[in-house]
Image (cartoon, rainbow, N blue to C red):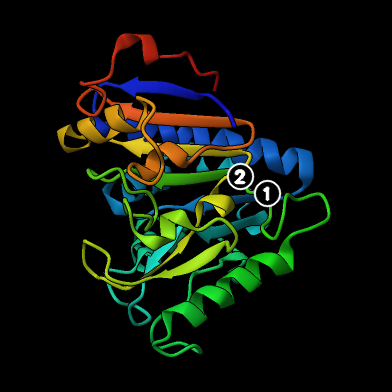
């Protein structure tokens, strides 16, 4: 378990731009070291803001997009192309503008896909896809992601792991279906905490006043069942990227410098 590091930016726009620059550096370094890189994307306003900032960055051309694997932390279980799906929004923000290898874009199944409307079967299918690319050097049945990004909800949820719901209590499966989520749509697919913790680095994104109490709770020693964001950490680094508003209720002693 890595100790959280905090980086606080003045506003959400600066946070998105700085996070995009940080991500480019991580991907380029991973590709130079291992030949390829793997990143887990997050949806929501902060995740999509980061992708839009990356799309407009001149430095994006430093990335070899053909050697980048993209995965998702969660997905709304809706038909392919639905504007509420995280992958649809990611394509609009960035993915359609860069030369990715389609075989390396691992979208979570849609509700009109090969698993039909069975979210649990779709989750098992995504878990199998993750396991199929995990190697002997990885830690369990998922690849060791270079960077796994998570937006933090006002209720401290990350991915589609909501407080007290069964998914956040999962200790063995890497991907599960979520039923009865407290925010629409109620049916989702999500990585579990064991899958999240396999990543080299986990980045948690929080911007806005509505995230201040969630950040303070998750970073104050709360348990992961009550505050799922508290249970999200990387093997080498856990990085909280916040703006001033989201950090407004954090004590200054929690701030730790983070090297790029």
User: Disc 1 on helix, strand or loop?
Assistant: loop
85 displayed left or right of 19: left
Tell me: residue 87, above or below residue 43.
below
Specify whether residue 259 is in view.
yes
- Can residue 14 be seen here? The reply is no
In the image, farthest residue toward the top: 253
Quadrant of the drawing holding the N terminus: top right
Query: Residue 64: where, in percent of width, then height?
Result: 64, 50
Q: Between disc 1 and disc 2, whose residue precedes? A: 1
Alpha-carbon distance for marks 1 and 2? Answer: 5 Å
Q: Residue at x 52, y 39 (%)?
A: 202
Quadrant of the rendering where the C terminus is positioned:
top right
Q: Nearer the viewer, residue 158 or 243?
A: 158
* Residue assigned mark 1: 144
Whether residue 28 sits left or right of residue 230 in the image: it is right
CB contact under 8 Å: marks 1 and 2: yes
Which residue is at a point 33% across and 63% down the rendered structure image?
Answer: 89
Disc on res. 199: 2
Q: Position of residue 19 (x, y in %)?
A: 43, 34
Identify the element where label 2 is drawn. loop
Badge 2 crowding class, 10 Å Cα cut-off, few under 14, some 14 to 19, many 20 or more, is many
Residue 184: x and y in percent read 21, 67
Q: Which mark is residue 244?
A: none
The image shows residue 214 at horizontal and vertical percentages of: 26, 36
Residue placed furthest toward the right = 136
Q: Residues within 10 Å of mark 1 (few under 14, many from 20)?
A: many
Viewer-closest of 61 and 229? 229
Q: Residue at x 38, y 30 (%)?
A: 241
Taking the image as shown, residue 60 lies to the left or right of residue 207, namely right
Task: Report the number of discs.
Answer: 2
* Residue 127 against residue 121 in the figure, above or below: above
Relative depth, front residue between 79 and 237: 237
């Amino acid at each position: 378990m890595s100790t959280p590091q905090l980086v606080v930016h003045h506003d959400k726009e600066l946070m998105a731009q700085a996070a995009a620059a940080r991500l480019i550096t991580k991907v380029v370094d991973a590709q130079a070291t291992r030949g390829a890189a793997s990143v887990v994307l997050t949806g929501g306003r902060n995740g999509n803001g980061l992708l839009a900032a990356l799309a407009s960055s001149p430095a994006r051309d430093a990335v070899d997009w053909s050697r980048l694997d993209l995965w998702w932390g969660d997905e709304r279980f809706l038909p392919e192309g639905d504007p509420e799906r995280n992958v649809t929004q990611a394509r609009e923000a960035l993915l359609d503008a860069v030369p990715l290898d389609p075989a390396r874009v691992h979208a979570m199944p849609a509700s009109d896909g090969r698993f039909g409307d069975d979210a649990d079967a779709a989750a098992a299918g995504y878990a199998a896809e993750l396991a199929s690319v995990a190697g002997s050097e990885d830690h369990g049945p998922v690849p060791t992601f270079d960077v796994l990004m998570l937006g933090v909800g006002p209720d401290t949820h990350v991915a589609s792991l909501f407080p007290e719901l069964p998914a956040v209590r999962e200790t063995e499966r890497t991907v599960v279906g979520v039923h009865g989520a407290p925010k629409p749509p109620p049916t989702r697919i999500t990585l579990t905490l064991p899958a999240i913790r396999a990543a080299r680095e986990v980045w948690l994104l929080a911007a806005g006043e509505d995230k201040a109490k969630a950040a303070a709770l998750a970073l104050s020693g709360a348990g992961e069942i009550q505050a799922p964001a508290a249970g999200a950490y990387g093997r080498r680094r856990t990085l909280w990227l916040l703006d001033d508003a989201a950090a407004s209720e954090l004590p200054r002693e929690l701030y730790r410098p983070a090297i790029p």
